[in-house]
């Protein structure tokens, strides 16, 4: 890949693909984390005398112009953060847009309207995506990818635009994501500990198998741990369990032993009869889960045991909460894990929306080494998959 830091953007008109698919409350942005993460790239271009043309998507308009998915609130919010005017074009392609781009001067910004108002952006056919991408980059000197959150998507603005542009490179955020994640998987400081939670083993199978042999320790929590415990012959009561994956769980535990990866499962749980319970029926319980009760969080003994595993770790990668943390009654395990990771002093990398929410709920957002802006992209990276967004930048650099 080429990197923005190595390219002179003075006097150039630069198309930046960002991930501003942010939550809105009417016309107000309620979480601007992704927008703020893109600011170093934007400020670098503007300060160097380049003109910034920003493109992104919002929601799922599915190829139709829908006012509720307009980027107008996002453009207004970005203007406040940058301290410069951020006009919003009525579309992302077409003669009117090209006229606005042609009139741009160095230090000026233009945001294009929602890419997904056009069906070609998300078409499964590359032959449909490429003409749209060519129109998108027409009249521009450089394409910059700074949208790790969509780099797993074969969208026209992600996979075809870099190839259609005169030159393409990774922005500062994309570069940071690559360096942290690739570095963690390929050259980690050891011991290397992965913490995997969430509700389903099925959604993490690829990750678990890819990490075996790479990590020294694999901590499994959340409801997915229930399946592993049942696979060991421990009754989990009414807890969420994927019974069709019991053999797969046993296979993973066997593979871990063969690859010298130590798997650690919870030793106690917080129990209740329903997810919406206002409080735990059984605060901490070891052994088999009684009939009619569900394990909805890991207990304090598990947090303590996991914290012991984390002591002295060199690198920690965490994805997935330890329980139903969205209910305060079952959030202690996830928050306890966040505190334990920070306390161990390792390079800590967090990814996934739910895990990010746990970290911020614990008030520890600034204590982690790196919080990835990607959800699906982060998961696919951990699975060892080649992300289309990175592949396109690599191919563009060889043109």
Image: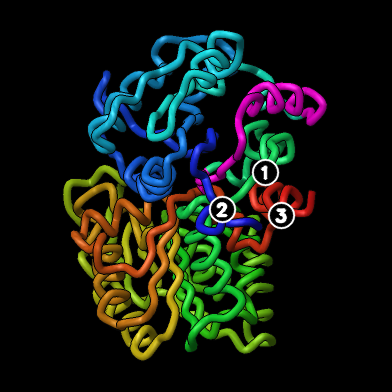
Asked if the residues shown at circle 1 and circle 2 are in contact, with their CB atoms under 8 angstroms apart, the answer is yes
* Foreground pick, 3 / 388: 3
| Quadrant of the rendering where the N terminus is positioned | bottom right
Q: For the residues marked 1 and 2, what is the alpha-carbon distance in whole angstroms?
A: 10 Å
Label 1 neighbour load within 10 Å: few <14, some 14-19, many 20+: many
Position of residue 239 measured from the top left corner of the image (x, y, whole percent): 42, 56
Q: Residue at x 29, y 56 (%)?
A: 358
* Foreground pick, 359 / 8: 8
Please tell me which of labels 1 and 2 falls first in the chain: 2
Residue position marked by numbered label 3 in the rendering: 394
Residue position marked by numbered label 1 in the rendering: 167
Position of residue 136 measured from the top left corner of the image (x, y, whole percent): 63, 25
Asked if the residues shown at circle 1 and circle 3 are in contact, with their CB atoms under 8 angstroms apart, the answer is no
Q: Residue at x 40, y 62 (%)?
A: 350
Left or right, 25 with reference to 266: left
Determine whether the residue tagged by mark 1 lies in a helix, strand or loop.
Answer: loop
Please tell me which of labels 1 and 3 falls first in the chain: 1
* Figure check: 87 above or below 214: above
* Foreground pick, 370 / 239: 370
């Amino acid at each position: 890949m080429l990197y923005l830091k190595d390219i002179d953007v003075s006097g150039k008109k630069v198309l930046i693909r960002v991930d501003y698919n942010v939550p809105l409350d009417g016309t107000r942005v309620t979480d601007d984390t992704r927008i703020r993460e893109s600011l170093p790239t934007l400020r670098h271009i503007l300060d160097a005398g380049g003109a910034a043309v920003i493109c992104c998507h919002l929601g799922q308009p599915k190829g139709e112009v829908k006012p509720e998915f307009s980027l107008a609130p996002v453009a207004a919010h970005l203007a406040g953060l940058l301290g410069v005017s951020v006009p919003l074009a009525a579309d992302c392609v077409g003669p009117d847009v090209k006229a606005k781009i042609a009139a741009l001067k160095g230090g000026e910004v233009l945001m294009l309207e929602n890419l997904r108002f056009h069906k070609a952006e998300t078409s499964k056919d590359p032959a449909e995506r490429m003409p749209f991408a060519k129109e998108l980059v027409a009249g521009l000197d450089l394409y910059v990818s700074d949208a790790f959150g969509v780099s797993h998507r074969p969208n026209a603005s992600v996979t075809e635009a870099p190839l259609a542009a005169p030159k393409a490179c990774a922005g500062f955020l994309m570069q940071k994501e690559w360096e942290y994640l690739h570095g963690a998987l390929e050259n980690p400081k050891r011991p290397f500990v992965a913490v995997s939670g969430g509700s389903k083993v099925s959604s993490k199978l690829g990750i678990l198998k890819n990490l075996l042999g790479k990590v020294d320790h694999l901590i499994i929590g959340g409801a997915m741990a229930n399946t592993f415990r049942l696979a060991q012959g421990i009754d989990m009561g009414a807890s969420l369990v994927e019974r069709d994956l019991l053999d797969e769980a046993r296979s993973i535990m066997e593979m871990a032993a063969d690859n010298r990866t130590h798997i650690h499962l919870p030793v106690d749980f917080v129990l209740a009869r329903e997810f919406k319970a206002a409080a735990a029926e059984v605060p901490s319980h070891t052994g088999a889960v009684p009939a009619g009760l569900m394990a909805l969080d890991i207990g304090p003994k598990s947090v303590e045991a996991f914290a012991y595993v984390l002591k002295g770790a060199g690198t920690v990668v965490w994805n997935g909460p330890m329980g139903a943390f969205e209910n305060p009654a079952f959030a202690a395990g996830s928050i306890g894990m966040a505190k334990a990771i920070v306390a161990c002093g390792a390079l800590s990398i967090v990814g996934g929306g739910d895990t990010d929410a746990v970290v911020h709920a614990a008030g520890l957002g600034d204590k982690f080494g790196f919080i990835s802006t990607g959800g699906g992209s982060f998961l696919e990276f951990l699975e060892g998959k080649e992300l289309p967004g990175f592949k396109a930048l690599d191919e563009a650099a060889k043109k």
